[in-house]
Amino acid sequence: MDPTSASTSTAFPPLRRQTPDDTLFYSIYPSLPPSLSASDALSSLSSLHLRLNSLFSPFLSSYLFHRDPFHLSLPPSLSSPCSLCLSPPLPHLHGKVHFADSISDEWFIVSLLFLASRSFPHLVIRVWDSDGDFLLIEAAFSLPRWLNPDTSTNRVFIHNGELHIIPIEVFPSTPTLQEAIEAVRNDKINTRASEAVQTAIKRRIEGYPEKAKENLHRVRVRVPVKVAQVLKMEPCLISLAVEAFYDRDIDMMKHAAKMEKFLKGRDGEIEIVRVSVTMTRAMYGQLVQQSFQAPRCYPMPSREDRTAYTEAELGMKIACGFEMLYQERLRAGQEGKGATWEAFKKSLEQSGCFDGLLPGSQEYKRVLEEASTYYKSTSLFSRTREITSAPVRRIDEILSLPYSAEDFNGADLPPNDDESWLYDGEDELNSAILEREKELQEYESKKKQKNVKQEGDDAGGSSSLPNEFNLGDMAASMQEFVRKVSSFEGAEVPDNSNSKDVQLDADQFFKAMESVLNRHGDDGEDSNSEMDFDESEGSDFDEEHGDDEEMGDMFMQSYSDVLNKELSSTSIKKSFVRAEQPNDPTEGPSNAGAEDVDEDLTPVDVDFNLMQSLLDSFSSQQGLPGPASNLLGLMGLKVPPPNKDK
């Protein structure tokens, strides 16, 4: 059956117990004068709504959604924030679609939104799903480094057929939605995303919305005549029937076991007809891949006729899905207790209505009955019944019209679509992985070229060879790295010129260390009072120790003596390479030669020891990733691999 005959104006919301995670949200903001009255704004929105529906109609009429159909609606009020898209009181159109297992539905809608932005350049469109700004995922390798899920709020929009990202330079902190929309419309502010980002998004929606037809699958089935008649008049109901079959529970299975509504025709006889049904590939996969035993009352052909049995088995699953859909919606519509009743009941529980009551007790049942009576008197109850019972009413309307099995016999059915896609998913997955790997390689290549260029700039043009290695550069980079400021996000690498040197308050530092050392080892005095760095104590401290320079010398001498004494009994001093001493006997002590110089007085060659430790660590990695290579890489230094021949 051709989905073009579906009534796209009629929406049949699925019956769910909770809001699904895989939901797409979208909001469209037109450019309206701020002085426009509320009534005039609603009139303009209604006009835009009609024009957009006219633009989308050729594509929607031939498309079958896996779950919810695409729709646009006006906000309930222009004077309060929108409950659906959380927009401030701004004139806009919005909607949401539960795309479930069909990612194609999501990108089909995105392509429609891009089409709308090209057709109406004044529109600013926002689209996101349960995971956030999913458009950024497609261009992950081309995004600026500052952009992440925490900083993307109110920064990603569709405008004039392109993706726009508001730079952090324009709004260092998160902008309001109104500020962001005005910035996108401002020609003086460049919010257009980079060409690499545009290419990544366009590649993802290339061929849409026309490409969306590839997501449909047509197949021949054998179903009861009532099911055939419903599908003939409302092909879009196949999505709700497949959902009911796929998400069935024990209570719904009881309806399928009886098949009271759809199995028998008007005359009470079981009439099975052969028809062609169009569904999405996801629906087809959900039906085919599930093992399901036919109800005892449902006639099935012999397995010897493989074609007939396959068509009947698939038709039986569709028929059971329709039975479960109808009976469950009928029951829920009569009770009027869908997801809204559960939410209402939960609010009562949170407010303490059932505190101290045992579930199932008489008092609990009495309070619950009173709550149910009050709920049924609300407008929410009437609205819930109307929405829930919509498919039931439509099915009853269709089956009240004249029909017979002869209407379907002898029809020229189109052949089944090729279902090799159902089993060749591995090739498609590998192709997608290879495409992602190619993007990653391009990203790494650009990053490497940038690092090489940066190394050349740092070398001042002294060398153009990226593999040239200089120990002096390594020592200088490490010293610069040590001087950088660290934060809770980690240490900053030397090439970050925005970092500042560490600022040390010498007075406070000396006072703290003096207190810890208890004024050069006087253990008998109480030092607790010395931890209070009052301004009044500063003058006494300065008088006792003289000026800052003299105080610093005294402290460093004392600190050095204590440290040397602590380390003298260890072998640490022997592990360091010391600087070479001059051979001139005139330098040094007057009564001692060079060979008599105390080793403890010989300064340690800090740079040499640092380089030796780093290179030893790098060599022990044997060419594999490790701490030394990672640290050197962060500093933009490339060390040649160790010589394995030695």
Image (spheres, rainbow, N blue to C red):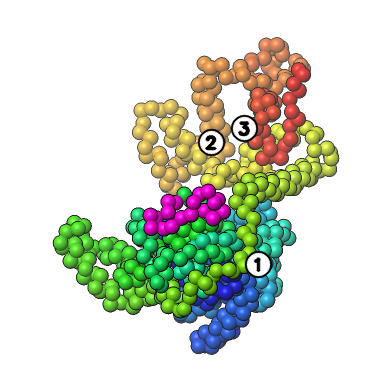
Residue that carries the numbered disc 2 in the rendered image: 551
The answer to whether 585 is drawn above or below residue 31 in the figure is above
Residue that carries the numbered disc 1 in the rendered image: 209
Residue that carries the numbered disc 3 in the rendered image: 627
Given the image, on which type of amino acid does mark 2 rest? Met
Mark 1, secondary structure of its residue: loop
| Front disc: 2 or 1 | 1
Give percent across and percent down for residue 249: 37, 55
Q: Please indicate whether residue 142 sits to the left or right of residue 541 in the image.
A: right
Given the image, on which type of amino acid does mark 1 rest? Pro
Give percent across and percent down for residue 173: 56, 62
| Front disc: 2 or 3 | 3
Q: Tell me which numbered mark, 3 or 1, is placed earlier along the sequence.
A: 1
Q: Tell me which numbered mark, 2 or 1, is placed earlier along the sequence.
A: 1
How many numbered tags mark residues here? 3
Magenta range: 292-309
The answer to whether 580 is drawn above or below residue 177 in the figure is above
